[in-house]
């Protein structure tokens, strides 16, 4: 599929580490070691709402979201997956998939608005993307 | 489709007003006049994660979520749709579809954890479900 004219929102780029590019979405890891938190960004210019995708792209988006959730479950401890598409601050369409632990710093509230990110250290910023990339390639 | 053994979680029942039953989901309106906020609950017993649905049920879920978003847009002012499937407190699988306004009381944060609900008055608790039911029946 074509991704002509697509450019990742600079705030998303600044807040994340790249994991892998799937058929529709760029998969990014939020650079916040408090949560194992993926962000999927469809590689299409000008999207804001899910409804801006074609029906076949929507099917692909939810399939890739399922894959992202399965990869998180395979790689980190997870008591509950959280899914969200908000876009109140960054309008470029993106979907959050977060592995939540009972007792994590935001539990049982949402991760959004839960205070400042704690960036990964030098080892973590390579190790977790590597493991997620491998899990997503299976 | 069968919904044998399904019972709506009592907290979801207490916090919402019924709107309509679609093929897969019960559509409920959060009884919180601060936001136009729908909750879709697949009528299947024992579901927690999206991945607990069959592939065809998942397709139907996202189709009904799309319909819910379109109904909200048709009936209330909306600057951005917010979608979420959290389940950290109520584990029964449910998907939130919320019409957000720039400047609403939680903007630009999420609606979850945004303070106590303000229940609809006597007129609102019938009028909005009626209009949403009509929009969802089109």
Image (cartoon, coloured by chain):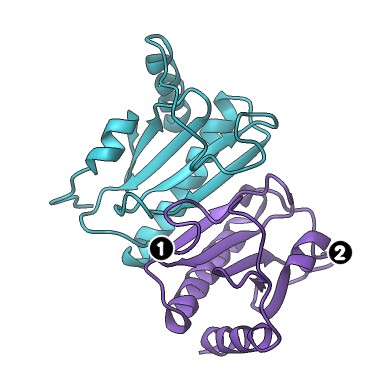
Chain colours: A cyan, B purple
Q: Position of residue B6 (x, y in %)?
A: 82, 64
Residue located at (57% from left, 64% from top): B61
A18 vs A2, left or right, is right
Q: Chain of mark 1?
A: B
Q: Position of residue B110 (x, y in %)?
A: 51, 52
User: Foreground: B82 or B31?
Assistant: B31
Q: What residue occupies the far left of the structure in this picture? A: A5
A136 in relation to B86, above or below: above
A80 in relation to B10, above or below: above
User: Which image quadrant for residue A72?
Assistant: top right
Q: Position of residue B72 (x, y in %)?
A: 49, 76
B14 vs A8, left or right, is right
Counting labels gives 2
Give me the C-alpha separation between circle 1 and circle 2: 42 Å
Q: Nearer the viewer, mark 1 or mark 2?
A: 1
Identify the disc placed on residue B5. Answer: 2
- SS of the residue at dot 2? loop
Residue located at (46% from left, 80% from top): B76
Dot 1 crowding, Cα within 10 Å, few <14, some 14–19, many 20+: few
Identify the disc placed on residue B103. Answer: 1
Q: Are marks 1 and 2 on the same chain?
A: yes
Dot 2 crowding, Cα within 10 Å, few <14, some 14–19, many 20+: few
Identify the disc placed on residue A13. Answer: none
Residue located at (63% from left, 83% from top): B129
């Amino acid at each position: 599929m074509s991704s002509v004219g697509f450019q990742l929102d600079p705030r998303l780029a600044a807040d994340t580490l790249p994991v892998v590019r799937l058929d529709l979405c760029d998969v990014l890891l939020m650079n916040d070691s408090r949560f194992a938190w993926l962000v999927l960004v469809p590689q299409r210019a000008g999207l804001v709402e899910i409804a801006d995708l074609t029906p076949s792209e929507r099917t692909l988006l939810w399939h890739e979201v399922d894959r992202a959730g399965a990869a998180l479950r395979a790689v980190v401890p997870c008591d509950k997956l959280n899914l969200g598409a908000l876009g109140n601050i960054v309008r470029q369409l993106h979907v959050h998939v977060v592995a939540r632990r009972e007792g994590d710093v935001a539990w049982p509230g949402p991760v959004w608005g839960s205070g400042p990110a704690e960036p990964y250290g030098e080892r973590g910023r390579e190790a977790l993307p590597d493991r997620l990339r491998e899990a997503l390639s299976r």
